[in-house]
Image: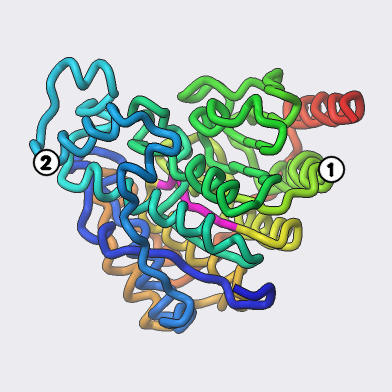
Amino acid sequence: MSPGAAPRFIGSTIYRGSSYGPRHPLRVPRVPTVMDLTRALGWLGPAQYLTSPRARPAALAAWHTPGYLAALERAEAQGRVSAEVRARHGLGTLSNPVYGEMFRRPATAAGASIMAGQLLRDPGVIHSPGGGTHHGLPDRANGFCYLNDPVLAILSLRAAGVRRVAYVDIDAHHCDGVEHAFARDTDVLMVSVHEERRWPFTGALEDRGAGTVWNLPVPRGFNDTEFQAVLEGLILPRLQDFAPEALVLQCGADALLEDPLSRLALSNNAHWAAVAALRPVARRLLVLGGGGYNPWSVGRCWTGVWAVLNGIEIPDRLPPQGAAVLRDLRWEGHSRGRNPPEVWFTTLRDPPRPGPVSDAVLTRLATLTQRALVWV
Ligand SMILES: [Zn+2]
């Protein structure tokens, strides 16, 4: 990839029709919506599309234990787990159920992240919305994540000779798996913005790791104005100080107001502003997906991410072929799925959700800024 090359999109058909089960939040389609919508809008031609390979256990063993990988493959093959495997590896639980593609699907997301790391040996931009499974642990599944593809992406960048990597995570949940991997590594900067007092209850403001860990827990109702303050007051200054050779952005869509799994109140303008602001920070950029459990808001958000990466102007109103993709979505088993508002079909951009900047956000930003001054 040459520096001026067009962004690449890594996708896979494995996500189509795959579900964690009828009552799980990940029963909704996400990656297929982005693939169908970007194509319907004429924004994703074959030259920019790459099919994700499925990572082999030997590649996944760059971070995961062989025993866990064998248990995960066996669970998919057998369609069940023993009580011992459930206890030891977190498989076959409500969060991480046994389902038909429980090895192949995460191994495909991981394959995309590993391939992205290899491609980004040369500068460029890659979007892999199937990635972002930031809770996965070396020896167990955790928080809907069977593998940790962001960790594998960073290790793959390393193997490709890229030394200093920044990881920014704007998912509503703290990236406990990624922090576990790199908290003591001064060549990986980690910045996470996440809802306070929410699962997995890690990511305290006080965590420093080796000095390159920056956690900002934010209160419920977190709005676009507050997000902008965090972007300008924390994310961008820490990135500028660190001067990464590569940047991995976990762009989870569950901090959006309409998401059922958080109490944050962002519009997708916040995500797109982050992508636009982070794009020039490093010569290599990998944008991953993450959480996002309202099928309309996650599909619209990540389709807009792809537009921003490509410099495509987002129309106020979607043409009929785009709206048709959104009209076809279903959200079974959730009250908000019964009568979705028309704007979820006909637009990509949410109305902005500005608001006051809370004292909690201001105080915590000041604490982190002070720490940065002391550490320099
Ligand atoms: Zn999340």
Q: Residues within 10 Å of mark 1 (few under 14, many from 20)?
A: few
Mark 1 or mark 2, earlier in chain: 2
> Which residues are the magenta region?
286-292
Rendered image: mark on residue 77: 2
Amino acid at dot 1: Asp
Image location of residue 179, percent across then percent down = 57, 29
Amino acid at dot 2: Ala
Q: Nearer the viewer, mark 1 or mark 2?
A: 2
| Residue 297 appears anywhere in the view | no
Is 277 situated left or right of 94 in this image? Answer: right
User: Does the stretch in magenta take in 244?
Assistant: no
Q: Is residue 272 above or below residue 4?
A: above
For label 1, the SS is: helix
Q: Could you say which quadrant of the image residue 75 lies in?
A: top left
> Of 214 and 294, which appears nearest the observer?
214
* Residue at left offset 75%, top offset 37%: 357
Image location of residue 261, percent across then percent down = 42, 36
Image location of residue 109, percent across then percent down = 38, 52
Quadrant where the N terminus is found in the figure: bottom right
Q: Which residue is mark 1?
A: 241
> Of 175 and 185, which appears nearest the observer?
185
Q: Could you say which quadrant of the image residue 210 lies in?
A: top right
Quadrant where the C terminus is found in the figure: top right
* Residue at left offset 18%, top offset 35%: 98
Q: Is mark 2 within 8 Å of ligand 1?
A: no
